[in-house]
Image: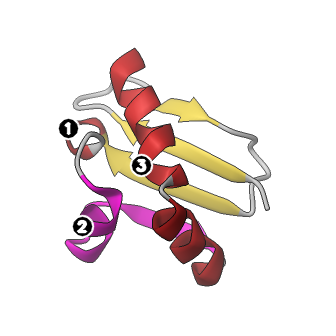
Amino acid sequence: MSVQYRLTLPGKAPDIVDGPDDATVVITVPAADAASDPTVAYMQGKLKASGHTGELLDLLRSGEAARALGRLAAAS
């Protein structure tokens, strides 16, 4: 499984992207919500994902998505 994380920034600023363009799972979240719990953001509809739902749930359950989004938020 490969994952791409995308933080969307307000306005016309380009997204902050981490991961390959041909990823099997793409997770997109507004930068303002990146530091929050990604599971909660997903349930609230703030975190969007494309790809295999089972793989997404594994990423959320393991905490890998939270760590990766936290790193991107800190770097932005």
Q: What is the three-letter code of the residue carrying label 3?
A: Ala
Which residue is the site of mark 2?
Answer: 40
Alpha carbon distance from label 2 to label 1: 14 Å
Residue type pointed to by label 1:
Ala
Q: Residue at x 33, y 67 (%)?
A: 39
Residues shaded magenta: 37-51
Left or right of 62 in this view: 37: left
Q: Which residue is mark 1?
A: 32
Q: Nearer the viewer, mark 3 or mark 1?
A: 3
Secondary structure, mark 2, is helix
Q: Is residue 18 above or below residue 58?
A: above
Q: How is the image coloured?
A: secondary structure
For the C terminus, the quadrant is top left
Residue 2 tag number: none
Q: Quadrant of residue 32?
A: top left
Amino acid found under the numbered disc labelled 2: Val
Can see residue 76? no
